[in-house]
Amino acid sequence: QVQLVESGGGLVQAGGSLRLSCAASGVTFGSYTMAWFRQAPGKEREFVGAMFRNTGYIYYADFAKGRFTFSRDKPENTVHLEMNDLKPEDTAVYYCATGRIIMSSMRQSTQYNYWGQGTRVTVSS
């Protein structure tokens, strides 16, 4: 049974940093793509970044490049999202997701089978 548990959200001032974590059980990183999505109030869920299952390559949304870093702690079966230089527009609930995703579908939230409960990030100006 796949289970994802996020942690690390909170309130931070603009320019600050947060580190989100997603503890995964029932998942083998080589077989499952791990991804982060976010959803701001009144907006659709959007892709943040993902580690593709076969290669371990990491892909980012344009807004995340240079500010966010996706990493993996294999022994702990945990992935992290380090977020720096946070902006008020980064305010959202951040979700960890996983599935046996093909590369062309990696940015589509509807393709992921398993989701965490989400962790809220609020960036004040």
Image (cartoon, helix red, strand yellow):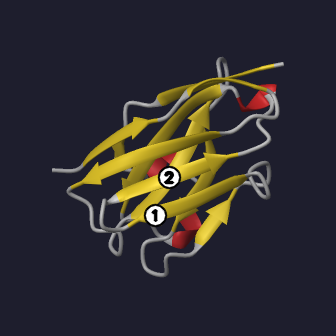
**Distance between the alpha carbons at the discs numbered 2 and 1:** 6 Å
Helix, strand or loop for disc 2: strand
Q: Residue at x 51, y 46 (%)?
A: 109
Identified by mark 1, the residue type is Arg
| Residue closest to the eye, 4 or 7 | 7
Identified by mark 2, the residue type is His
Helix, strand or loop for disc 1: strand
Relative side of 105 to 75, left or right:
right
Height in image: 103 above or below 60?
A: below
Q: Which residue is mark 2?
A: 80
Look at the numbered discs 2 and 1 and tell me whether their residues touch, using CB distance below 8 Å.
yes
Height in image: 7 above or below 41?
A: below
Alpha-carbon neighbours of circle 1 within 10 Å: few (<14), some, or many (≥20)?
A: some
Q: Is residue 22 visible?
A: yes
Height in image: 78 above or below 39?
A: below
Q: Residue at x 79, y 48 (%)?
A: 63
| Residue closest to the eye, 97 or 13 | 13
Q: Position of residue 26 (x, y in %)?
A: 20, 57
The picture quadrant where one finds residue 107 is bottom right
Q: Which residue is mark 1?
A: 72
